Image: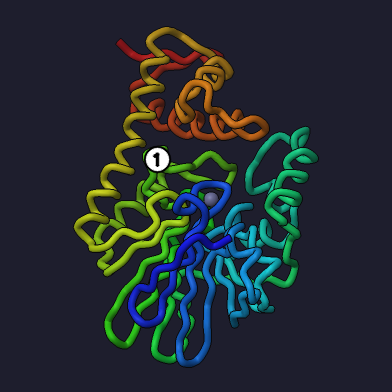
Amino acid sequence: MVVATRQLGRHVTVLFGHEQGKYPDGNTVVVQGRGGSVLIDPALSVRNAQPPLAVDTVLLTHTHEDHAAGLSAVTTTDIRVHEDDLAALRSVDGLMRLYGIAESHWPQMTDLVTERFHFEGWPSATGLVDGDVIDLGDVRVHAIHAPGHTSGHTVYLAEDDDGVRVLVMGDIDLSTFGPYYGDASSSLEAFETTLAALRDLRADHYVTFHHKGVIDGSDVFRDAIDTYAAVFGRRRESLLALLDQPRTFDQLVESGIVYRSGTRPPLFGDSVERHSIRRHLDRVLADGDVATDGSHYWRHE
Ligand SMILES: [Zn+2]
């Protein structure tokens, strides 16, 4: 159920999910113009909307189970996501490949996304790219490629004739958990570049899919981005601390740098740690802070 709504200017409405869009729920955005309507990221909470939501176009910020959870209940035939995330939206197997989890976990993970998140695979979905604009007459929605979380992750800037600008951020969620780059298609470098680029993007409101909900004003947004980006450094420090003694990659994964002790999700948590540690390890090796003999890694004195 949509818990609350908030109107941002004359054209943008946020439909808040449970606990401000706490996972598995999320915050959905509707942009209504004179010439049509767009819905961004149909969350679990819009599944039971009455009457069902009818829009011209659905845009996803990226292909993850929670961002398409309400999709089968929205009336539209025009579904779009960045072309790098398109294969994952078109089929469940494509989604499994985007996650990059071990194939032995595919059946269980498939059950999870189909039963809990109603993920069907949408073969007729189409791709979009950076710079695409959906013109709704008196408001326009601009696609801005913002990779890192997934390779196709895209944010959407709605700008109306009154000059009101709303940036829909997807899973650049500005949470205390920090950036998530634990899938096969994620990238630490791309995420850093994305945050640096978005930091100076001026808007009146910034909407995240989880946790924060709506941030008002560029100054508050910039501070939130800086706090969020600081988590990269904390994970790097966690990794270096583990490497005060020689460890194998599997030992590093067992300890982990992403999830706090006791909070690692079953099924995909190990895979997230593997991908994230691999990315930080490549970085500290390239920086010359860590050495390896091929099986063990340790911090230089
Ligand atoms: Zn996501």
- In the image, 185 versus 95, the foreground residue is 95
Indicate the quadrant where residue 12 lies.
bottom left
Where on the picture, by quarter, is residue 194? bottom left
Q: Position of residue 108 (x, y in %)?
A: 77, 38
Q: Could you tell whether 219 is left or right of 270 in the image?
A: left
Please determine whether, in this image, residue 293 is positioned above or below residue 183. Answer: above
Residue 84 in view in this figure: no
Of residues 165 and 277, the one nearer the viewer is: 165
Residue furthest to the right in view is 107
Colour scheme shown? rainbow
SS category of the residue bearing label 1: loop
Q: Where residue 150 appears, x then y in whole percent? A: 53, 51
Residue drawn where x is 19% and y is 57% of the image: 219
Mark 1 vs ligand 1: CB below 8 Å: no
Q: Nearer the viewer, residue 43 or 194?
A: 43
* Residue at the (47%, 34%) spot, across then down: 279
Q: Quadrant of the C terminus?
A: top left
Residue drawn at x 25%, y 67% as measured from the top left = 202
Q: Kindly identify the amino acid type of the residue bearing the numbered disc 1.
A: Gly
When the figure is inspected, residue 201 is found, relative to residue 184, above or below; the finding is below
In which image quadrant can residue 300 be found? top left
Q: Is residue 66 above or below residue 234?
A: below
| Residue that appears at 61% across and 75% down | 53
Q: Is residue 295 left or right of residue 156?
A: right
Image side of residue 298 versus residue 38, left or right:
left
Q: Nearer the viewer, residue 272 or 5?
A: 5
Where is residue 122? Give x, y as percent: 73, 66
Dividing the image into 4 quarters, which one contains the N terminus?
A: bottom right
Residue 123 x/y as whole percent: 75, 67
Residue topped by disc 1: 178
In this rendering, does residue 239 appear at all? yes
